[in-house]
Amino acid sequence: MSLPKIVGLEQEYALKLRSPDERAAFHTSCLLVNAYARSIGLREPGLHMVWDYGHETPYQDIRGKIFRSATGQEVMGEDENRLINAPLPNGARLYTDHAHPEYSTPECRSARDAVACEKAGEVILLRALQLATGDLPDPETGLFKNNTDHQGHSYGSHENYLMEARAHDEWLAGSPERAAKTLIPFLVTRQLLAGAGKVGGEREGKGVAGYQVSQRADFVEAVFGLATTHSRALINTRSEHHADPRRFRRLHLILGDANLCEVANFLKIGTTQIVLRMLEDEALPGDWSLRDPVDAVQRVSRHWDDPVELADGRTVTALDVQRHFLAVARGYVAGGGLQEDPEGEEVLELWETVLSGLEHLELSAELEILADPGGLARQLDWVLKLWLLNRYRQAKAVGWDHPYLKTLDLQYHNIHRGQGLFYHLQDRGLVDRIVDDDEIARFVTEPPADTRAWFRGRCIRQFPEALRLVNWEVVGFAQGTVHRVVPLLNPLKGTRVQFEAVFKRCGSAAELLAAVSAG
């Protein structure tokens, strides 16, 4: 029986600065991280908690290669560590990654919780921006949740899924051709559900792009690969699983777009969870291997309804591929799959609704679409943005080469509620919701109850003065001159049901450690 597909999302936010200097961006990002950490009491005197990098292996590949000695990793001082990192009481991590503030959600068991937790990240970043305003070198700093600056740079919106060790090794590390027949075609065509939309293109030789489905597609250069800032792959192969390696693996996907539409994000996560469950249960029949997956992901982005070539010479559309996976998923659920997953039916129904809508979506050569934002424009970012841009094009009688369209594209992703075009449309009631503002607000301060994130977050909230180190796999306490580490190697353990009573009766970290040791 397949494992529940615990998911965590990582979003790098773009900073808008008048001086686009990487050092200024790094400094600004660190100001945001620390402003928020101070506001919740995590920068008080006597607190020495740091992010523990000891379990991170960025140069080891699941295919058995080591691209740099582990001892060659840079050693970071504690002051620098605290400057760029803030483990949060909601189980998440807020930190600076190069020149970007990045928010990693806590581990979530459900797609709905993952959507709410990622939206909570937007609230946290905006709060950080408000708190830091007086210290910022640029008082007009803005935050954007997207994947490209239209200047040739891309930043990530990554997904992480818990997989069974055996299935991961068999389908990805040991026999990647199995993934090529099933998982890869699904991921290449999933952008129909979850593309964020983009004006223009950044790949020579791919033809002029007026508008694309995906922001990330132009930057995909491989099917499998270790790098995340260049030569980006559909599936990242870093051997860094953040769990018991005898039982679990992490599937690290870096091909996705940053979603603002909750329905699109819910579908991106929920359909992938189902496909991975089917993969582990050996319930993915057929061979849909693409002749050139990298070319296909870019072709679908630029001409979503054009056929792509399979390895056996057949041609299919992205919609054909998604229809196949939906049909297989329906059979899987009917046969007893996902019995313990209350979201399964909702995901399937939305998947069907969106695919049916795409079948009836007719675009002219100039990508004219919709007189009013109905149907898919209420659910998918790339359709909603296309409708919005066409309103401007029609009003001004301009083509896709008009420079202001890229400005509107970027402004769609501004997360400031008074400035961002997406939130202007949502506040007018033109966008469907999956979660409500109360759910999002709850996850700003509280972790999901049904994963190990609950234990981590509760430790940070209740015993911050005793915590010495935190990462996804452990929490470590200072007990005099001795460090006591609590391993969190099973993402399905450490839940509120298991430990709420323990935390209520423990008045100190020492009592908690004794209770955990006693079982």
Image (cartoon, grey):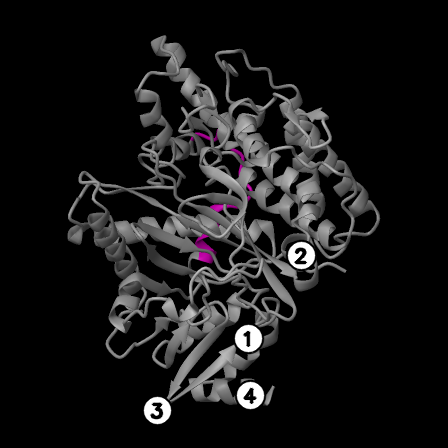
Reply above or below: 12 against 417: below
Mark 4 or mark 1, whichever is nearer to me? 4
Reply above or below: 390 against 412: above
| Residue 399 quadrant | top left
**Quadrant location of the N terminus in the rendered image:** bottom right
Whether residue 508 is visible here, answered yes or no, is: no
Callout 4: helix, strand or loop? helix
Q: Is 389 on the left-hand or right-hand side of 99?
A: right
- Name the foreground residue: 420 vs 141: 141
Q: Earlier in the sequence, mark 4 or mark 2?
A: 2
User: Disc 1, disc 3: CB below 8 Å?
Assistant: no
- Circle on res. 500: 1
Residue 404 lies, in percent from the top left, at: 30, 21
Mark 4 or mark 2, whichever is nearer to me? 2
**Residue that label 2 marks:** 174
CA distance separating discs 4 and 3? 19 Å
Q: Earlier in the sequence, mark 1 or mark 3?
A: 3
**Residue that label 4 marks:** 517
Q: Earlier in the sequence, mark 2 or mark 3?
A: 2
Q: Is 41 on the left-hand or right-hand side of 305?
A: left
